[in-house]
Amino acid sequence: FTLMTKGNLHLQLNHIDQAIKDSQKAIEILKKGLGHIHPEVGRAMMRLADIYNYDCNGDWETDKDTARSLYQASLTPLRETFGNVNSDLALANNNIGIIYAMKNDTKNAMKSFYDALVGYGVRTRADEELSSTPVY
């Protein structure tokens, strides 16, 4: 957790590259110590994804793709630990949906937003299937 805190401090100082390095190292250590399926691993991946999503000044497309990949990687430890209904899982899916929407990929954006609603306990998979069935 110390490296994540250090990364957050670097982020506050606008030292983006060092914040990324600290966060990546923290994820490595967390995976070794706690295993790949642990909520803190998922949360650390989400934090690193946030840096790429909101704070990076590199290539926009690359930063968003990196953020999306990290959010997606965070889904497994969060889902396996907490189940389908939890706010961290919902937030990750929501952020994935926003990235897809910014890239005009509405199909994947909508799927991610539905998954976010499931994570918040507002919808179920059955609701999504019903809403996509045409009514005659």
Image: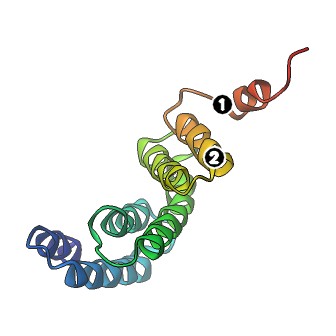
Q: Is residue 77 left or right of residue 24?
A: right
| Local secondary structure at mark 2 | helix
Position of 77 with respect to 7 (left or right) is: right
The CA distance from mark 1 to mark 2 is 20 Å
Three-letter residue code for mark 1: Thr
Residue 85 lies, in percent from the top left, at 53, 39
Marker disc for residue 29: none
* Location of residue 126 by image quarter: top right
Looking at the rendered image, the quarter that the C terminus falls into is top right
Secondary structure state at the residue bearing disc 1: loop
| Quadrant position of the N terminus in the picture | bottom left
**Label 2 sits on what residue type?**
Thr
The answer to whether residue 118 is above or below residue 3 is above
Q: Nearer the viewer, residue 99 or 96?
A: 99
Lower position in the chain sequence, tag 1 or tag 2: 2
134 w.r.t. 83: above or below:
above
Q: Which residue is mark 1?
A: 124
Give the residue at the far right of this rendering.
Answer: 136
- The x and y percentages for residue 75 are 54, 58
- Give the class, few, some or many, for how many residues have Cα within 10 Å of label 1's Cα (few <14, many ≥20): some
Instruction: Describe residue 69's horizontal placement relative to residue 11 as left or right.
Output: right
Q: Nearer the viewer, residue 46 or 41?
A: 46
Residue drawn at (53%, 41%), measured in percent from left and top?
Answer: 116
31 with respect to 136 (left or right)? left
Task: Tell which residue pokes out farthest to the left in this image.
Answer: 13
* Residue drawn 13% across the image and 73% down it: 14
Question: Where is residue 28, by image quadrant?
Answer: bottom left
Residue bearing the label numbered 2: 106
**Camera-nearest residue between 58 and 77:** 58
What residue is drawn where x is 71% and y is 31%?
128
